[in-house]
Image: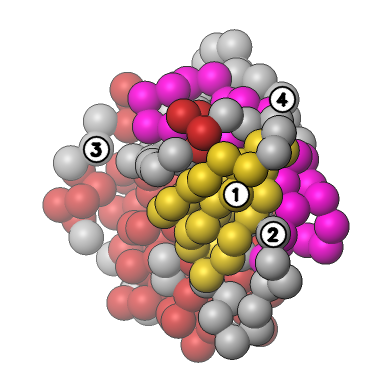
Amino acid sequence: MLEEIDAVNWGDLPGPRDLYEPDRVAPGLRALATAKGLVQAAGAGSRLAGGGLVHDHSGAVFPAAVTAAPILLAIVRDGQPGAGATALGLLDDALAFAVCDRHTRVATPYAEAVPICCALADQLRRHAGLLAAFGAEGRWLLADAAHHWRFDVQEAVAEGDGVAAFGVLAGRFPDGTQPAELHRAGRVTPLAVQVAPHYPLSDRSPDEACLRIDGARLDEAAPPAVLLPGGCNSGQADW
């Protein structure tokens, strides 16, 4: 875990100059990973919450929180109980602040400009079993992450004025037609579309779905296209 922390150049990650303090991140994560009790965990958490991963006084979250999410989840799994609770609290704050963040986007392996809330939700879902076993706090965090659904297109066919897409759905898709962003690998600007289930979503296989994408061309929605909720984010942060 310490090697993962030191492998990142936290100063290279973007953030508002008046709030983000990258020099806090690696020392704070190392201190949290090695904390032996509540006092040490609280001190490390304060460092990370005061400009490292989030800035709790202003309600800001930084791209460093997405990069650090797997490390925080490893601390939840392997750290001392106080350190795990502190790491979970930082993740909870990061997602809560990200929901209110209308500008910050981050690059991911599947899209170049993902709203930070959706990127954090993806990290949390990858460790759903761990969080569910952590207690009520972990389950609440997963429930919050579920609002930031993601749909990976595996096959698409033209249909009427749009596209019918078959693929894998993560999170919880709301009822009815929803605004969505359509991303493709290498394309920075998301396309605004309207999306609805083409067939009723199945409770037996919730990860398999067919969605109707109105307003999209087949070449835009073909694999490896990814759909994310519309309205999570309205632009790129200007730092």
Q: CA distance from mark 3 to mark 4?
A: 28 Å
Q: Is residue 120 left or right of residue 223?
A: right
* Mark carried by residue 8: 3
Which tag is nearer the camera, tag 3 or tag 4? 4
Q: CA distance from mark 2 to mark 4?
A: 27 Å
Whichever of labels 3 and 4 marks the residue nearer the N terminus, that label is 3
Whichever of labels 1 and 2 marks the residue nearer the N terminus, that label is 1
Write down the residue under mark 4.
Answer: 234
Q: How far across and down, in percent of the image, does residue 86 sit? A: 52, 66
Q: CA distance from mark 1 to mark 3?
A: 40 Å
- Nearest to the observer: residue 219 or residue 205: 219
SS at mark 4 in the image: loop
| Disc 1 and disc 2 in contact, CB within 8 angstroms | yes
Kind of residue sitting beneath label 1? Ala
Examine the rendering and report whether any part of residue 107 can be seen: no
Whichever of labels 2 and 4 marks the residue nearer the N terminus, that label is 2
Write down the residue under mark 1.
Answer: 164
| Disc 1 and disc 4 in contact, CB within 8 angstroms | no
Kind of residue sitting beneath label 2? His
